[in-house]
Amino acid sequence: MNVLALEFPPITHLTVWPTGPLGFNKVAGIYVFATIATLVLFMIAGSKKQLVPRGIQNIAESSVDFVRNSIIMQTIGPDGLGYLPLLATMFFFIFFSNITEIIPGIQMPANARFGIPLMLALMVWVIYWVVGFIKQGPLHYLKNSTVPPGVPKAILPLVSFIEFLQILIVRPFSQAVRLFANMLAGHLILVTFSVLCAALFAAAWYIAILPFSFALLVFLTAFEILVSFLQAFIFTILTAVYIGSSIHPDH
Amino acid sequence: MSMLHLIAAQDPGELQKGLTAVGRGIVYGGAAIGPGIGIGLVVGNAITAMARQPESAGVVRTTMFLGIAFTEALALFGFVLAFIITG
């Protein structure tokens, strides 16, 4: 089991990762780390409760403020504030399991495996169906989400069928695939450029290309910080949009 | 011998591998065209909107990321499909 990313693992590890005892492997370890990191961040931040926040409390408060103002208020509105704990923990869990992509020694985004993104998306699926059933009632929820207003009668069956597939399959599938494929693609790009840099590091004429390749690797690593933040943000905001469409039907 | 004869004389496994690789390339390349145009439209119009009304930049930014996410999904399906294809 190659835990520290000190040498290149075989290329097959991109899709099949060797497991240790009880099926525990590096990816599972990263998820445990992400869970504990989210827990510890909010436990420490909530233990002091100073009036003027400092240090970790400051980070936690500004990020909760971020989730509140730029995710919930923009998509659900004031009556979605009850979902703040769910969305904030989801954001941080996804962010911590993404950011291990660029941490030296780990270098593996845990969400580049399909399992947990799929589970998260299915969790969101259950939440928005249940919320829709409770807030609008089963029949109203189905009617409001499959019959968009202002559609001509002739193409209504087709549109309804597409909208029904949308809330039944397409939403969770695209949400899971989006997170998984973005992280896998970023990981693949970093792997490609690392392998290229290692191959160029030789006493031959082509070592002259190495600085460019290495500079691009550094740049892409910085880009992956942005991507891992953005994917956590997009996953959370899509969750908020789906819950919002269950609370407020389109008129 | 013509080119076709050369190809036919080769090991069929090799040919299949090569064609699989070509297919993967076509699948991902084709899947990237539409989303590329789409994301360009989304971001371009969002920038126009933000430049015209800077006070509504927050709403526009959120909607822009949503639009990007929905558009990008098609490219990512192509990316996943390219992995699923095996010779």
Image (cartoon, coloured by chain):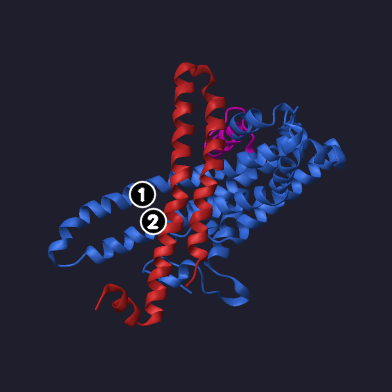
Chain colours: A blue, B red
Q: Is residue B25 magenta?
A: no
Q: Nearer the viewer, residue B42 or B22?
A: B22
Quarter of the view holding residue A157: top right
Quarter of the view holding residue A204: bottom left
Report the residue marked by disc 1: A220
Q: Position of residue A178 (x, y in %)?
A: 55, 50
> Hey, what amino acid is under mark 1?
Leu
Q: Dot 2: what SS? A: helix
Other residues around mark 1 within 10 Å, as few (<14) / some (14–19) / many (≥20): some
Q: Residue at x 21, y 64 (%)?
A: A201
For the residues bearing labels 2 and 1, Cβ distance under 8 angstroms: yes
> Hey, what amino acid is under mark 2?
Ile
- The dominant secondary structure in magenta is helix
Chain bearing tag 1 is: A
Q: Work out whether A115 lies above or below B42.
A: below
**Residue A189: assigned label:** 2
Query: Considering only order in the chain, which callout, 1 or 2, is on the residue closer to the N terminus?
Result: 2
Side of A160 relative to A93 (left or right): right
- C-alpha separation, residue under disc 2 versus residue under disc 1: 8 Å
Q: Work out whether A152 lies above or below A139.
A: above
Q: Work out whether B8 lies above or below A68.
A: below
Does residue A170 show up? yes
Q: Residue at x 27, y 50 (%)?
A: A215
What stretch of residues is rendered in magenta?
A47-66
Does residue A40 show up? no
Q: Nearer the viewer, residue B41 or A102?
A: B41
Q: Residue at x 58, y 64 (%)?
A: A28
Q: Position of residue A206 (x, y in %)?
A: 16, 62
**Residue A73: assigned label:** none
Q: Position of residue A36 (x, y in %)?
A: 60, 54
Q: Position of residue A148 (x, y in %)?
A: 73, 34
Q: Dot 1: what SS? A: helix
